């Protein structure tokens, strides 16, 4: 992991993955506003924030490179892109949805899975357990929507009960 974080590294990492600030913020557990301030050079992130961003990128297959005597700082893909990887999942929007950041074939997207789709009786904790049980079907449904570029107006992949039945 890079010791320091240059704004261009964050922008380049997002560009490699084709994700927006919201998806990175979700994956790192920080606000999109923080990502914006870092990328604009308006703030220097503390070690904890650098670690969260680097961990999120690492989970998505991107690593930061430190500046050397012969080259500037940068980013690169850490492993071949491919497969479907769940990076993170959390209960969001007052327990109505579960948010997940998913990577498939080098592309990443933020998915929103309706708790009602998980047969959890509206209970967020039960929905997280059900999410883990239905993970393969959820990842297939999200992957299909990413490949089909089926995104909601806010840029997320939305997964409903019907999507899980089809998966």
Image (cartoon, rainbow, N blue to C red):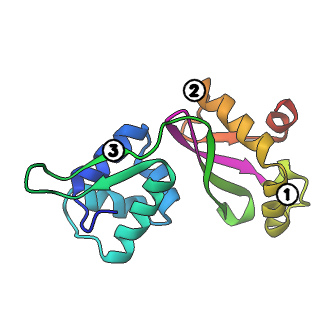
Q: Are marks 2 and 1 in contact (CB under 8 Å)?
A: no
Q: Residue 76 carries which label?
A: 3
Q: Are marks 3 and 2 in contact (CB under 8 Å)?
A: no
Element class at badge 2: loop
Dot 2: few (<14), some (14–19), or many (≥20) neighbours within 10 Å? few
Magenta stretch: give its range. Answer: 102-114
Dot 3: few (<14), some (14–19), or many (≥20) neighbours within 10 Å? some
In the displayed structure, would residue 103 be above or below residue 145? below
Q: Earlier in the sequence, mark 3 or mark 2?
A: 3
**Location of residue 156 by image quarter:** top right
Report whether residue 56 is seen.
yes
Element class at badge 3: strand
Indicate which label's residue lies in the foreground, 3 or 2: 3
Dot 1: few (<14), some (14–19), or many (≥20) neighbours within 10 Å? some
Residue under label 2, please give it: 149
Is 114 displayed left or right of 66 in the figure? right
Residue 91 horizontal/vertical position (percent): 69, 63
State the residue in front, 94 or 115. Answer: 115
Element class at badge 1: helix
Give the residue at x 83% y 49%.
134
Give the residue at x 42% y 47%.
78
State the residue in front, 51 or 72. Answer: 72
Quarter containing the N terminus: bottom left
Q: Which of marks 1 and 3 is nearer the N terminus?
A: 3
Q: Which mark is residue 130?
A: 1
Question: Among all residues in the image, which is located at the extreme left?
Answer: 69
Q: Which of marks 2 and 1 is nearer the N terminus?
A: 1
Gap in Å between the C-alphas at discs 2 and 1? 26 Å
């Amino acid at each position: 992991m890079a010791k320091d974080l240059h704004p261009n590294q964050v922008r380049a990492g997002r560009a490699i993955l084709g994700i927006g600030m919201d998806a990175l913020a979700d994956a790192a557990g920080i606000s999109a506003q923080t990502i914006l301030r870092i990328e604009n050079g308006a703030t220097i992130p503390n070690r904890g924030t650098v670690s969260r961003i680097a961990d999120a990128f690492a989970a998505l297959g991107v690593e930061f490179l430190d500046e050397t005597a012969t080259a500037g700082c940068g980013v690169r893909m850490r492993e071949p892109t491919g497969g479907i990887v769940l990076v993170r999942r959390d209960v969001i929007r007052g327990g109505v949805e579960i948010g997940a950041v998913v990577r498939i074939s080098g592309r990443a997207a933020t998915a929103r899975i309706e708790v009602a789709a998980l047969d959890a009786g509206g209970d967020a904790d039960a929905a997280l357990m059900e999410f883990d049980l239905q993970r393969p079907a959820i990842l297939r449904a999200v992957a299909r929507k990413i490949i089909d570029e089926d995104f909601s107006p806010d840029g997320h992949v939305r997964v409903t009960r019907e999507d899980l039945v089809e998966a």
